[in-house]
Amino acid sequence: MGDADLTSSSQKSVVIIGAGGHAKVVADTCRSAGIAVHGFVVPDVAAGAAMPDGIVLGGDEYLDSLDLQMHGFVVAIGGSSQRRKVTERLRARGGRLMTVVHPSAVIGARAALGEGVLIFAGAVIICDCQFGDGAIINTGARVDHECRIGEGAHICPGAILGGEVEVGAWTVVGPGATIVKGKSIGSDSVIGAGAVVTRNIPDRVTGYGNPCRIRT
């Protein structure tokens, strides 16, 4: 590990909001990092129901009664728009996102992690990178030197970011995509799986292909 502060809160248990595959990966990462999973909040599932990874504490209404001082929380919803809404709802009540780093991740010197950054198994982050609150560096992703990753951005499994890349807030870089050195991607954009980004990409667009082209 580098100089990053890997603990955004003193809580040793976490409530996970979500129930899909992403939530399962978050639960596994938490347990690997020595963080107990208190339970899950899952819309349309009755409180007390059993899940493979734990117990359902309640549905959407439970968010308003969740004790945000006792537990940290992770919004484990894959879609950026819904993840953003739930995050803002909980933060408005004073909740803090919990930073979770898998022990197999490699983090270089002087990495700066915002609140609630998630770094999954096998990720490699080189020196002098910065990550906004709630950014996700997924399984096996590679982030080279001096990259800047915005709030809530999701770098999906196997994606590769060359040095000095900038990724805007709430943007998704798809599985296996490659961003060449020095390029930037705007906020609220989506880069498709396997894309190769060789030029700057603006805000609020979708791009895919090799080379990556803007499609919307």
Image (cartoon, rainbow, N blue to C red):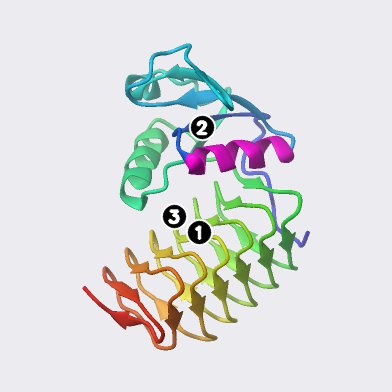
Which SS type dominates the magenta stretch?
helix
The spot of residue 162 in percent (x, y) is: 58, 80
The Cα–Cα distance between marks 1 and 3, rounded to whole angstroms, is 7 Å
- Foreground pick, 54 / 201: 54
**Which of the image's four quarters has the N terminus?**
bottom right
Disc 2 residue type?
Ile
The Cα–Cα distance between marks 2 and 3, rounded to whole angstroms, is 16 Å
Query: Which residues make up the magenta segment?
Result: 21-33
What is the secondary structure assignment of the residue under circle 2? strand
Task: Answer left or right for 172 relative to 110.
Answer: left
The Cα–Cα distance between marks 1 and 2, rounded to whole angstroms, is 20 Å
Task: Answer left or right for 204 relative to 181.
Answer: left
Q: Residue at x 43, y 13 (%)?
A: 47
Of the image marks 2 and 3, the number of the one nearer the N terminus:
2
- Residue 146 position (above or below residue 114): below
Q: Which residue is mark 1?
A: 132
